[in-house]
Amino acid sequence: MDELTAAGILDPQLRASYEECKRLNSLHGKTYYLATLLLPKAKRPFVHALYGFARYADEIVDDLASTLSAQAKQDQLAIWGKYVLQSLESGKSDDHVAKALIDTVQRFAIPHQHFDAFLKSMAMDLHVTEYQTYEELMTYVYGSAAVIGLEMVPILGALSEEAYEPAKTLGIAFQLANFIRDVGEDLDRGRIYLPLSELNAHGVDRTMLEERKLTPEIITALKEQIERVRSLKAQADPGIIHLDPTSRPCIQAASDLYCGIVDEVEKIGYDIFNKRATTSLTRRLRVATFAYGKAIRARHRLP
């Protein structure tokens, strides 16, 4: 049985929307997509729907090939975002991505404010280029990442309310790991997502980053950011037990692989300007194989 049928998604137009979301996930979120395969088939389409929405919005903002001005992108995001939020309220949508999202939100009673917060953070990317403090950065990260963890919990299956805070924390850890890896790419977009006050404490300023030369000061600054990711992961991982057993292997694998990005930054000697830190295929397969065994046992309720 295919994933959509297993999830009870039979309407042809709705299936097409879910397929588009899955395509976006498999194309742009390879590690995330790999982890999703560890879920039971009946849960996967709904995760794809959340990813599809987030990715589509992100593409409006960050498509470097686009010739649109920042204002034009802001207008496009505002129009599409307003339509999606209105669709959430009405429960109907003809949009090729939003149709699956609306269906998912209705099935799992996901709070609409999470999507409003996400869209607000995406809009910030079009006019905010740096953050002075970690607290200021968290305003952005809450909408861009924490709410995604909160959206996921109803789909994954919460055994108690204690599942939500760790999910939020893990979403933040994923985002911060990406910020560390993507310093160079973000500079291409004119943005810095590492708190400037924390960089300054190590003798690093925006000008130094824009020179794209690895210095001892930058290395020590990155080490501090890496330790925060590991600390957040350590806080969040014990909370995975509050999810349905069939979902735990997926989230543990995602945690290990996403937060593992910082391990790869260390392996390239912190040279984030000239090399891209990527999780090796060997590590992905090792983590996925171990998690797959746990997923099968959970589904069959084996000890």
Image (spheres, helix red, strand yellow):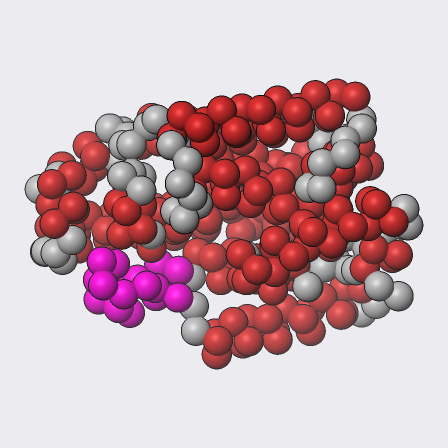
Depth order, front residue of 38/291: 38
Direction from residue 73 to residue 101 in the image, left or right = right
Where is residue 109 shown, x and y percent of the image? 77, 31
Q: Is residue 275 magenta?
A: yes
Direction from residue 24 to residue 219 in the image, left or right = left
Depth order, front residue of 245/226: 226
Q: Residue at x 85, y 52 (%)?
A: 7
Q: What type of secondary structure mainly makes up the magenta span?
A: loop
| Res. 207 image quadrant | top left
- Name the outermost residue toward the bottom: 282
| Res. 204 image quadrant | top left
Direction from residue 273 to residue 10 in the image, left or right = right
Q: Is residue 38 visible?
A: yes
Quadrant including the C terminus: bottom right
Q: Is residue 47 visible?
A: no
Give the answer, above or below, for where 38 lies relative to 159: below
Q: Is residue 190 magenta?
A: no
Q: Which residues are magenta?
A: 261-278
Give the answer, above or below, for where 157 lies relative to 216: above
Depth order, front residue of 242/77: 77
Q: Please count the marks in the image.
A: 0
Where is residue 180 shown, x and y percent of the image? 32, 51
Q: Residue at x 12, y 56 (%)?
A: 213
Where is residue 116 shown, x and y percent of the image? 58, 24
Quadrant including the N terminus: bottom right
Depth order, front residue of 200/95: 95
Q: Residue at x 44, y 28 (%)?
A: 72
Q: Residue at x 63, y 46 (%)?
A: 52
